[in-house]
Amino acid sequence: MPGKLDLERALVVGVASSALFDLSKSDAVFRNEGEEKYRAYQRENLDEVLEPGVAFPFIRRLLDLNDLSEDERLVEVVILSRNDPETGMRVMRSVQHHGLDITRAIFMQGRSPYRFMEPLRMSLFLSANEDDVREAIGLGFAAGHVVGPGVDDDGGNDLRIAFDFDGVLATDSAEQVYQKGTLEEYQRTETALADEALPKGPMAGFLGKINRIQGIEDVRSVDDPGGYQRRVRVAVVTARSAPAHERAINSIHQWGLRVNDAFFLGGVDKGPILAVLEPHIFFDDQRRNIDTTSHLAPSVHIPFGELNGA
């Protein structure tokens, strides 16, 4: 029997079909020929399986974490789609074909269903529709715009997640100081405030849910110290460098959260680091970084804060 779903305790993620699957052919029909041709195209190709998209490996691995508990469902993924229910059938058939444990979906013809994030207690919404993501961010939800091509899924069950810090885990308040002054002024400010936690950013709640799952792994590791292989690993990859690194570390600790690894790069290109780290998903608030990393790792732009006009 599957574990019981408690929306307050579980990590609930909403994913648009555009983030989960490669919809480039379908989108081209919609853009070039209109909605009716698009609906006909989806009906004619109902049994043609959609190929994995940018978020597919991440979502599959998240769902696989449910085997860590027999009593409760740790992760729940809900399809949030602008398709109407009829054309959405192709999405759900593709979900079933790929063996994804997703049974819940919201289909709203021509309208974004991200407004249902709150009643479903979602910690994250992923979509390839940037407008929907920006609207969700503007309403205070954690949302990300997937960018770049899909990547091959090697079928493993480990999960590596990488976050930028400012504007992602924390607000962009420190970043604003840097943008309006000099590097030296920024370093002085961050050193003076090293022990003062920054306010939480849009992805801190999601990290908290991931940490809860890591806590279950901690128990497994204690019970089986020689045999259990931890599956979830979290990294921060940030342009901060010493001495500003201390405030980042202290903030995460004071929030009651944790990460396994931290890369303080001082403005060095993140792409080569991610190419070695190989995260299954990377979150960053600066689009120029995402444009670099999206060819090396599945990447998500978080359009939060002043730099993003939010």
Image (cartoon, rainbow, N blue to C red):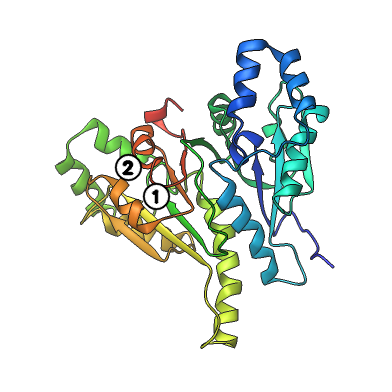
Question: Residue type at mark 2?
Answer: Ala
Q: Which residue is mark 2?
A: 174
Q: Position of residue 242 (x, y in %)?
A: 21, 56
> Considering only vertical position in the picture, is 112 above or below 258?
above
Looking at the picture, tell me which residue is in the foreground, 30 or 305: 30
| Residue placed under numbered mark 1 in the picture | 198
Quick one: which residue is furthest to the left in this view?
A: 184
Secondary structure state at the residue bearing disc 2 = helix
Q: Is residue 231 above or below residue 155?
A: below
State the quadrant of the N terminus.
bottom right
Q: Residue furthest top?
A: 33
Residue drawn at point x = 57 percent, y = 74 percent = 217
Above-or-below relation of 61 to 68: above
Amino acid type at mark 1: Leu
Task: Tell me, yes or no, if residue 219 can be seen here.
Answer: yes
Residue 256 position within the rendered picture, expressed as x and y whole percent measured from the top left: 49, 63
Q: Position of residue 162 (x, y in %)?
A: 43, 53
184 vs 166, left or right, is left
> Left of 262 or right of it: where is 98?
right
Residue 171 horizontal/vertical position (percent): 42, 42
Name the residue located 69 percent from the left edge and 64 percent from the top edge.
66
Cα gap from disc 1 to disc 2, whole angstroms: 8 Å
Label 1's element? loop
> Nearest the camera: 221 or 295?
295
The answer to whether residue 84 shows anywhere in this view is no
Q: Are the residues at dot 1 and dot 2 in contact (C-beta closer than 8 Å)?
A: yes
Q: Quadrant of residue 84?
A: top right
Can you say whether 23 is above or below 254 in the image?
above
